Image (spheres, rainbow, N blue to C red):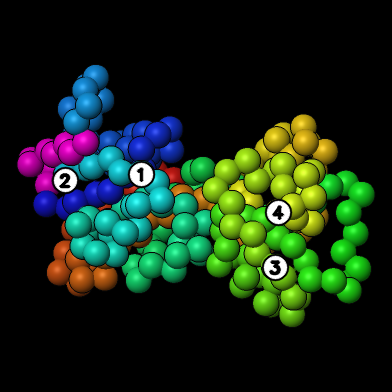
Amino acid sequence: MINVALPKGRLGEKIYDIFEAAGYECPSIKEPNRKLIFENEEKGVRYFWVKPSDVSIYVERGAADIGVCGKDILAEYEPSVYELLDLKKGVCRMAVAAKKDFYDDGRNTLKVATKFVNCAKKYYASKCRDIDVIHLNGSIEIAPILGLSDVIVDIVETGATLKENDLEVVEEIFPISARLIANKSSFKFKTEEIETLMQKVSALIG
C-alpha cells in the first residue's frame, strides 16, 4: 500500500485526477463526505487530504510515503525528502514586489515583508543585501502601502492583486509548481511501487 498525502483544495483535486488517470483511482474520494482518508486495496493506494503546508511534514516523518506540495514549501522549509517530479500544476512564481515608484538605492537596510522568511533571507544573502525581515501571515500587499516595508516577497500568479494595490514585480526569485515528493525510507523499501507510479504519472503530464 502506498500512502499518498494530497493537498486539500483545487490543486489536490487536479492532482488526484492525474493519479486516477494513471490507474490509481479511489472512487470514494469523489463522494460527498467529510472523510479525510480513502483507500483502494485492489490498487494498493491510500490517499489522505491534509493542509497544503503540512504535506511535506507528513512525508518527511513517514506518515505518508509520497505527497504533493509546492516548490515554495520545499524552498522555505527544506524538508528532508526526495523531490521526484515536477507535476506542472499550480504554476506561479516567488517574486519581489514594490510600489511602482520604489527605487532601492542600497544605502539603507531594506525592509522586507513576507511569510516566506527563509526564501527572502536566502535570496538577499545571495545578493549581499542587508535586510530587516517582517514576518506576516496574510494581506502582505498592504505592507508597502502603509510604509511597514519597502518590498514584499510573495507568491505571484497573475499579478492582478499586485496591480490592484499599485504594486509591481521588481525581481523574480524562482518558479513554483506542484512537486511529487517521497519519504526517503519509503523510497528505499517501496522503490518499485513508487517508481512505477512515478513513471505512469510522468507519462501523463508529458
Q: Which residue is mark 4?
A: 152
Q: Amino acid at mark 4?
A: Ile
Which residue is the extreme one toward the left? 41
* CA distance for labels 4 and 3: 11 Å
The amino acid type, in three-letter code, at marker 1 is Lys
Residue 51, disc:
1
- Crowding around mark 3 (Cα neighbors within 10 Å: few <14, some 14 to 19, many 20+) is few
Side (left or right) of 180 relative to 66: right
How crowded is the residue under tag 4: few (<14 C-alpha within 10 Å), some, or many (20+)?
many
The magenta segment = 36-45
Residue indicated by mark 3: 132
Instruction: Residue type at mark 2: give it.
Output: Val
Rendered image quadrant of residue 7: top left
**Numbered disc in front, either 2 or 1:** 1
In the picture, measured across the screen, residue 17 lies left or right of residue 171, that is left
Q: Position of residue 119 (x, y in %)?
A: 58, 65
Could you tell me if residue 54 is visible in this image? yes
